[in-house]
Amino acid sequence: MTKDNTVKIMQSIQSELKAPKGQTNKFGGYSYRSAEDILEAVKPLLNKYNCFLTVSDEIVEVGGRVYVKATATVHESHSDPIALTTAFAREAEVKKGMDDAQITGSASSYARKYALNGLFAIDDTKDADATNTHGKSKSLPVVTTTEF
């Protein structure tokens, strides 16, 4: 596959992708999109362009804090990856009403959502869920790089 073809595939998927905000935060009264919403919207486009997506997590420690590092990768069928991005979300030390597995799962979902946002050029900066913490501290992920 040529670099030009790779770029064209990703440009097409990014420009055609419509991932509506299918979730509602009842407490804050705003709509948002989840990683599941993005995945549901992108699957037909991946099929159209003969691609597939993998999303994986890795637990990493930085400065004594535990983060979930999510990596989202697009592959063209039978080829090496054509694009990937990573995002990090810090696990809360304690989250009321959640056991340790739920805390990790929550950080994983958050990191995966932002890795998918970076990979598919979805802008969530105006989302209320990016800024409204309802009085609770919330760690934001750091989207690092997207590679083609």
Image: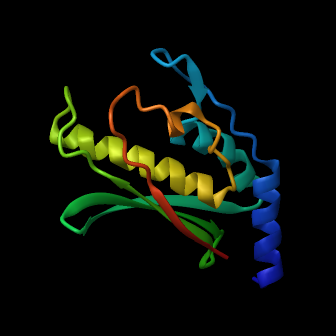
Q: Is residue 75 above or below residue 99?
A: below
Residue 40, horizontal then vertical, whole percent: 62, 39
Image quarter hosting the C terminus: bottom right
Q: Is residue 16 above or below residue 80?
A: above
Name the side, left or right, on which 139 lies relative to 28.
left
Residue 30, horizontal then vertical, whole percent: 58, 22
Residue 25, horizontal then vertical, whole percent: 50, 21
Query: Toward the viewer: 41 or 79?
Result: 41
Name the side, left or right, on which 7 lies relative to 118.
right
Residue appearing at x 71%, y 53% in the figure? 47
Which image quadrant for residue 20?
top right
Name the side, left or right, on which 138 lies relative to 94.
right
Residue appearing at x 52%, y 42% in the figure? 35
Q: How many marks?
A: 0
Residue 59, horizontal then vertical, whole percent: 28, 62
Query: Toward the viewer: 103 or 90?
Result: 90
Residue appearing at x 74%, y 51% in the figure? 45
Q: Residue furthest front?
A: 135
Image quarter hosting the N terminus: bottom right
Q: Residue furthest bottom?
A: 2
Which image quadrant for residue 105?
top left
Name the side, left or right, on which 98 lies relative to 80.
left
Q: Is residue 24 above or below residue 13?
A: above
Query: Toward the viewer: 86 or 142?
Result: 142
Q: How is the image coloured?
A: rainbow
